[in-house]
Amino acid sequence: MGLIVGTHALIRADVLFRALTVAVVDEQHRFGVRQRSALEEKGAKAVGGEGPIGARPAPHVLHMTATPIPRTLALARYGDLDVSALRELPRGREAIETRIVAGEHARERAYEKLREQCREGRQAFVVCPLIEESNPADRGPSGAGAGGEVEVRAARAEYERLAKGELDGFELELLHGGMRPAEKQEAMARFASGKADVLVATTVIEVGIDVPNATVMVVENAERFGLSQLHQLRGRIGRGEHRSSCLLMGPPGARRLRAMVEHSDGFRLAEIDLELRSEGELVGTRQSGLRQFEIACLPEDAALLERARARAEVIVATDPGLEAPEHALLGEALEHAFGAGASEPISA
């Protein structure tokens, strides 16, 4: 067998390859560091063929994503990853209009736009951050409400409310991760076939959904989602010939939401995400947070980073084990900061 297509199941310990030489990881941002590392190690642990187990080099790995996570973007800047960017829209698609919707009057206009599109034969998504409200922590300070709190909308309750309220008379479907696989498939099939006008869902629709007739995306409590999630959700619309709109329900001052309005380029959004969340552990598993420098700041110090990289390449080429006397302190500092495996290759 020359080609295997699969899910996370391919990284299980009992899955062995005879000669894994190329691995393609789609939607890379949905995998953890250890999961991606385990897949890369499959090449070195190949069975059969010439030589003992572990004698083979790691496979070539292609990571694909519309929104690189902060850690991956930082690794690319360090030169540990080569990057190819596809910045043009697929043929026949138009840019998606994105707006922040704040206040009840704006909300009414947003749902009127959704109804207009459905009357014209189009379809829409309504995305909520929760399946159901379960505790007081599901309320946050992101907008006005009774006592200064904001209702965080849950998919089940919103589905019932919309069916009797703003979307009375339209066909609605509910989809969330708590449903059985057969129920999810049935709900998605009804929406994809056009039998349902609106799909009320959670982020379960973030990837793998292709309904060209869907032209409106309403994201409730949008400030509770990350930039990567928002960009992926927005990608569920604008896949056909009709002009599409993404309506972000949330505070107008939120920087993430403003970034979504101003940018459609996933790489630019990833850069903003890096600025907001930091890169995490380059040698480790944290994929955001924990900015590691006391003085340097990415991306502002990109020129300094290039100089450091050039110097590091010379050191790695001449003394990869940092055994030379002049590199002893550098080796000790790396081991102190990152542990005994600091000199090992960094997994993407």
Image (spheres, helix red, strand yellow):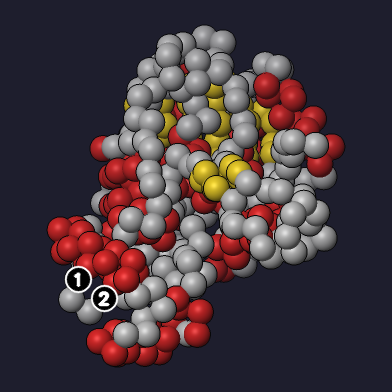
Camera-side residue of 185 and 274:
274
Q: On screen, 11 above or below 106?
A: below
Say left or right for 324 vs 197.
left
Give the position of the N terminus as an image quadrant: top right
Name the residue: 54% across, 21% down.
214
Whether label 1 touches label 2, CB < 8 Å: yes
Give the image location of residue 264, x and y in percent.
Answer: 33, 34
Identity of the residue drawn at 43% across and 12% down:
92
**81, above or below 310, in the image:** above
Apparent side of residue 183 relative to residue 154 in the rendered image (left or right): right
Residue drawn at 79 percent across, 30 percent down: 186
Type of amino acid at the residue the image marks with label 2:
Phe
Can the viewer see residue 105 in this picture? no
The image position of residue 46, as x and y in percent, is 73, 56
**Mark 1 Cα-neighbour bin, 10 Å: few <14, some 14–19, many ≥20:** few
Label ID, residue 296? 1
| 193 relative to 59 in the view: left or right | right
Q: Nearer the viewer, residue 271 or 53?
A: 53
Left or right of 309 in this view: 93: right
Could you classify mark 2 by the number of other residues whose Cα lies within 10 Å: few (under 14), some (14-19), or many (20 or more)?
Answer: few
Which is more toward the observer, 208 or 214?
208
> Which element carries disc 1, helix, strand or loop?
loop
Q: Residue at x 58, y 38 (%)?
A: 207
Q: CA distance from mark 1 to mark 2?
A: 6 Å
Asked where in the image residue 95 lies, by quadrant, the reply is top left
Q: Position of residue 199 (x, y in %)?
A: 63, 31
Amino acid type of the residue that numbered disc 1 sits on in the rendered structure? Ala
What is the quadrant of residue 176 in the picture? top right
- Work out whether residue 187 or residue 329 is closer to the camera in this orientation and state it: 329
Residue 299 horizontal/vertical position (percent): 22, 58
The residue at which mark 2 appears reads as 293
